[in-house]
Amino acid sequence: MESISAIIVDTTYHNENNNYSVLRVLYNDIVTNVVGYLPQFISNEQVTFFGEWIEHSLYGIQFNAKSYEIETPDTIKGIESFLASGIIKGIRSSTAKLIVEKFGKNTFDVLDNEPIKLLDIKGIGQKRYTLIMESYYEIVGIRNVLITLQKYGFSTSMSIKISKFYGENTLKILKSNPYRLIEEIE
């Protein structure tokens, strides 16, 4: 299996039912397509895809991704770009800037472990805080489930199916009784 590390340019197509996606990515300074059963990504996100190059009769050479790893931004600019991307409800560019100014490179640590500190930022009240955290947990939670299940050999499409079936408690359920998969997932 080959791997490519690329920057997401945009999503050309994404099927909400099965998560089949066609992405345009920047790989080795060339914009190319990545296809596969993948979650939604945001522009400028750094992702390593694992799969193989294929030649489609109509669309030409593209990378068929079987799995992926998201590289968490670790620079101030990268963290701010991620937050300002619109993927997390309640955070726009001005709020992203304030959050990163306050927490710097520790921003994701704060969001994961001490999110209540967001209330210290001007413009974030209880209602907006709730919106931000619900959205953040949804995005991060789904990605964590997909990444964890892929480590155990599940395909992205099967991981998505499992995640949709069990919802936000997927990892907890599977840790307590992984045999439920056999009984409950077709």
Image: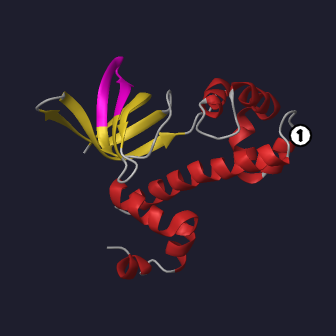
Q: Quadrant of the C terminus?
A: bottom left
Is residue 114 shown above or below 91? below
Describe the element under mark 1 as helix, strand or loop.
helix
Q: Is residue 180 left or right of residue 172?
A: left
Could you tell me which residue is drawn at 29 percent across and 30 percent down? 33
Looking at this rendering, what residue extends furthest in the left direction? 57
Q: Is residue 53 left or right of residue 67?
A: left
Is residue 27 shown above or below 14? above
Q: Which residue is mark 1?
A: 120
Could you tell me which residue is drawn at 72 percent across and 47 percent down? 131
Label 1 is placed on what type of residue?
Asp
Corner quadrant of residue 90: top right
Q: Is residue 163 left or right of residue 73?
A: left
State yes or no: residue 25 in magenta.
yes
Residue 37 visible in the picture:
yes
Is residue 124 shown above or below 179? above
